[in-house]
Each structure stands twice: as C-alpha cells, then as structure tokens.
Image (cartoon, rainbow, N blue to C red):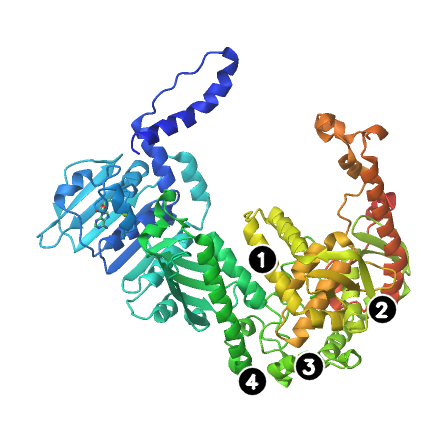
Amino acid sequence: MEIDEPDQVTVAMAEPVAVESASAMEPPRIRRLDDSVVNRIAAGEVIQRPVSAVKELVENSLDAGSTSISVVVKDGGLKLIQVSDNGHGIRYEDLPILCERHTTSKLSAYEDLQTIKSMGFRGEALASMTYVAHVTVTTITEGQLHGYRVSYRDGVMEQEPKPCAAVKGTQIMVENLFYNMIARRKTLQNSSDDYAKIVDLISRFALHNSNVSFSCRKHGANRADVHSVTTSSKLDAIKNIYGISVARDLMEITVSDDNPSQSIFKMNGYISNANYTAKKTIMVLFINDRLVECSALKRAIEVVYSATLPKASKPFLYMSIEFPPEHVDVNIHPTKREVSLLNQESLIETIQTAVEYKLINNNTTRTFQTQVVHSTPATKFASKKDTENNPSHSGIKSQNVPNNHMVRTDSRDPFGRLHAYWQDGPFSQHEKKSDLASVRISVRQRRNPRESSDLSSIHELLSEIDQSIHPGLLDIVRNCTYIGLADEIFALLQYNTHLYLVNVVNVSKELMYQQVVRRFAHFNAIQLSEPAPIPELLIMALKDEDLESAGDNDDDLKTKIAEMNTESLKQKAEMLEEYFCINIDQEGNLMRLPVILEQHTPDMDHVPEFLLSLANDVDWENEKDCFQGISAVLGNFYAMHPPVLPNPAGEGIQLYKKNKDKSGSIGHTAEVPGQDDLDQELLAEAETTWAQREWNIQHVLFPSMRLFLKPPKSMATDGTFVKVASLEKLYRIFERC
Ligand code: ADP
Ligand code: MG
C-alpha cells in the first residue's frame, strides 16, 4: 500500500506532459514525486474541507472514549479548528510518531480490518492535517501530573514536547488550514457555508452519540450553536438538537433481518410522519456507529415517502444500522464517507418495505387524529408547521400563492413542484366541515357517475374559480381580437385601443384546469391508438428528470420507482376512470384520456411527465386536494406548451442540419443552410407540429377562452397578461408577426 501510492500519483502527473511532447517523439522522463508533494496530494484527499478535518478529529475523540467533546471554529475552520475531549489522551512516547502517515493505535494487521470497531484505523488523518495546516496537540494521560504540548508540520514534530498544565484528555488545534494550497483556500474563502456544515456534522454526531455531550461554537462567541446534554433517550436527543418541532413528528422504527442468504443486520431509528414537512430530506445514517452516507438508501426511502405521503415527501430520517463488521467494506473511500455494503439491494428493500408499512399505518393514525381535531378550534393547532407559514384557512403553503394560481407551475419545471402549491394538512376549511375518513369512504363508495358532480369538493373548487375572477381581465378575454403569435409563448391581442401580450401556456393551463373541474365525471374519451405501457413511460420521464437535474443514473432504482408508481396508479384506476376518464388497465397500460376541449388533443410527447406527475404530485388522501391535484396535472398536460421539436422558423433551422459538426466554426451557423444539408423529414414534421399549434391557438384556444376562461386575479400581475405600452416594443413584435 505505502509503496503503491506514490507510483500511482507519479503516473497520473506525468500524463499531460506525455501528450504535450508527443510531437518531439522523445518519451518524457518519469520521475518519482517528492514525498512532501505526494503527502500533500493525499492530504488534500482526506481533508477536503474544514468539515472533513472536524469529522476526523471528533472521531478520534470518540475512539478515545470521551464523554465530552467541544469544538471551536474560526473563519469557517480556515483560521482555526479546535477539538477538545476528555478521552484517554496520548502517551508521551507516542507523540513523536503521532502525525506520521500510517501510524495508528487501532490496527496492526490487515485481518484486523474485518473486526474493526473504531472509526479510525488508517492513521492518516492527523498526518494529513500537518501537511496542509499547523497542528498543535495538548494531551495528558491518566495518572500524569502534567500534560504535553507539541506542534507538527509535514508529519514531524517541530520541537520536543513541552510540559504544560492540562485537563484530562486531548486538545487538537488545527490552524491556517490549506495555507499551502492557495487555490483550495481561495474557493473555500468564498463559500460561507462551512461553519453551517460543521454545525450540521456535530448535530449528527450528537444525535447518535447521545451518551456524549457535544458543543460547537464560533471562536469568541458566548453561545454554542450545538449544545447537547447526555441522555439515554434518542427522542430527547433529537428534541435537544433538532428541536421539538422535529421530535414531535417522529415515529420509532426497528427492522432486522437474520436471513444469511440476504443480509444480516439490525436497524433502529426514527422517521418523520405525515405531519412533518421540510424543504430538504435530512438523513442521519450511522452504520456500525460510523457516520456515513448511502445515497441509494436515501433515494429508496424518499420514493416511499413521495408515493405514500406526497406532502411529507422530504422526510427526517435517523437510522442506525448494525452489521456484522465483516459485511461492511469501510475501506473504499479515503474519507470513509460513502460505504458499500454486501447485499446492499436486499438491505435497501427490507428497509424500504418497513418504512412503507410504518407510513401506511401512520396514515390511519392521522385520519383518526383528524377526527379529534375537527371538533377543536383550528387556532389550537397554530403551532403546526404549515399553519405557521400561512395562517389563512386555505392552508396553502408558504409561497402565499392564491388558490386560483395553483395550476400554474413553472413551465420549465412542469412536474415535481405542483404539490408545493396545493392545500396541505388536515386543517383546510373543507375538512373542518367534514370528517376526512368518511369523505374517503364516501368517495370510494360512490359508484354512480351522474351523482358524482354533486360532490361538495367539486362545488368548492368551482366557487373558488368564481371568487377569484379578475373582472377587467374577464372583459378583455371576452371582447378581444386575436392578432397572432408574437413568439413561442406570447400571443398578441387587441382590446379596444390597447394591445396585450398573453402568455399562451399560462392561459391554456388555467383554461384546461377549469374545464376539467367543470366537466368532472362527464368526459368523452380519447382512445389511444395502442396501449401505452406506464412503467416504460415513467422510466422515460425519470431519465428526463435526471438529465435536467444531473442526478445519479441508477437504472434499477428508476425501474423500482416506475413499478411502485404504476402500482399506485393501478390502485387508483377505478376513481381515475370514473371521474376523469383516465383509463388504466390491469396490465398497467394507459388506454384512454379525457376530452377536455373539443378538437384538442394533448401533445403525446408529454405523456411521460404527465404520468409521473399524476403518480407523485397528487394528494390522494383528501378528496378536494385530490381532485384539484388531478385537474391541475391534466391542465398542465393539455396546455399548449411549445412543441418538443425546436421551432424551424428563424435560427431554429440550424438544428435540422444533417451534419452539424461538419458545418465548422460558429461564424457559419448564421448562414441559412442549403436544402441538401437539412434533415427534410424531421423538418417537415417540425413545421407541421408548429403550424398545427399555431392553428390550435387561434381556432381552438382563443375561441374557447372567450367562452369559458374565468381569468384569476393573479394573471393581472404575474406576467400572463402584459399591456404593450411602448411603441418600440410594438415595432419589434410586428416585425415578428
Ligand atoms: P486513526 O484514527 O486512523 O488511527 P489518526 O491519524 O486519526 O489515525 O490518529 C492517529 C492516532 O492518534 C490514533 O490511532 C490515536 O491513537 C491517536 N489519537 C488521535 N487523536 C486522539 C485523541 N483525541 N485522543 C487520544 N488519542 C488520539
Ligand atoms: Mg482518526
């Protein structure tokens, strides 16, 4: 191991030189790098940011059996990181080699790795720090009258240890981190969140090691940002560190598996319930008491949450997993942060199932709680997160989006965020009037479609549309003349002597939404020419989503998500068919869609997103939210988005060149390509699609809009209707028309 590493580094460093001098035909000399360079490179790997140094130091303190650990940080850790503990200390005789690479008290033979229980074992952390910072150690061991202090640089002591007064344990000071790595120091100086990362790290340690008291504060600050007291109850620890608002909404979970053909493990922890909402998942994961990340497990659990509790889909999770140590390969990453596990898949599946079971059972509890709640004044529950953010009865979350605004999601993010606009929690007006459980039963029991539009929730949605009408816009919509498209999104309207630009996507989305609510349970059907397999379409949508977010590319996981989503849609098939004419067969194929506007069919290129959105963004628990959600998802799907194929008019034509790379420099792209250079077939398709859309906008959308659209007030201010005031703008638009 020691011999290999420098060689690897040498080869890697030599490569670029070889490429450069290839023309000279003289092979470059391979040189062995200076030890100090090798060590600094390795140090940069182990200590990537201040928070990695803190993690190593705290783990050392825990390994030393400390019951109290305090951390002081200056300048996000760049100026100073100081970790003091009350552990067993370091022997005087060991001080000279303490900071050499591969000196450790925790491992002596390779076989020990199989049974290692401590967090450190590579003997690399302290050494690394001395290559990229100034390290000073003060320590005292049991029974000594005084301690020693000594500073290190590049792995060696700077002078003999000096006797000094000391309290039990060890204090390690790391100063001027990355003083000799200018680029890294600069990047880190510009980022302000390192201290936050350190606080987050210490919180996680404090949660798991609730028998140790932790504190973390900024240098010179009186108040600690983490201050934990020892407790034997994990829930108390969570309350203490993350606050009562988190601890209140947690459920305990334990899982174990002792089937040797799968994986042998025990897991216990706490996971959030339906009442917990947050912007980001927090997952505190310890495997064999080691703080790690396992993104596959995290994703898998998130999937379960969004399938079962869409509104609580960013959970808080604390899990402590115990394996026989021989099942964990801790050695894969220099910082030991991501672990890989034997039989990872079956482990994830077991935990996933357990979480799902827990959530489903908890849902029942929530229904029960609601029954209690609704006899009590809502104000009593003002401490609930959602109500905190928005005390209004409509229960819409913190964005303060008016009800009527709900269907308009960002067109660049057509799915995935819808739910953020929807009513949340069991405290909306509607539910105060009726009992959630009985509503659900009544929906399930209602079998006669003719009666279904008598549902009070649909009446409520309809009257919400009426209440939020903007009279001025209504007049414009009713009495305008359509002039033409100004660009891909905006159409130009004349109303009296004024000209307006109207966002076609927004208006059509709202119109479709309102039509779905009006036609509820009375749709004609569009029969698909052939069954559309939902799992495959969902996988397509998930892949698109990944492209956009540069997420990981785990195909198995996508398959699993797609299967779960299909399953959940199949379970809702009866209701979807009865009320929305969305027909899904038992094999998981999409067969029929509703007619929302006569003469208009949705762009089938958007079916994958539609299905994903339907599976993930709808709250299936509450009748009104559910209907509103489905209507919004349909509205978005049927809206007149720009086609997926780029517009061949204008510069878009460049995208239909047959051999794009042959066209050479950027300067050429401005020229209009000759007929032969173009992919005629694709071009023809694109031209038809765009022309069709334009026709639809003029002959279907605008006439229907005049008849049916009740424009909400928000459209007057959110850029959907813009009065064109300046003449220059007018000219520009007319040029395009
Ligand atoms: P590792 O933890 O992998 O053994 P480190 O470089 O982190 O390697 O630490 C080297 C050695 O220094 C440890 O094995 C341990 O014996 C000693 N040590 C480090 N920090 C402490 C501490 N806070 N208390 C007692 N001993 C420590
Ligand atoms: Mg260590």
Count neighbours of disc 3 (C-alpha within 10 A) and say few if under 14, some if 14 to 19, many if 20 or more: few
Q: Residue 121: x and y, percent?
A: 27, 45
- SS label for mark 4: helix
- SS label for mark 2: helix
CA gap between label 1 and label 2 equals: 38 Å
Q: Amino acid at mark 2?
A: Phe
Give the residue pinned by disc 2.
708
Discs 1, 2 touching: Cβ within 8 Å: no
Quadrant occupied by the N terminus: top left
Q: Amino acid at mark 3?
A: Gln
Give the residue pinned by disc 3.
445
Upstream in sequence: badge 4 or badge 1 = 4
638 with respect to 262 (left or right): right
**Picture residue at 46% right of the left edge, 46% below the top:** 191
Give the residue pinned by disc 1.
561
Looking at the image, residue 629 lies above or below residue 133: below
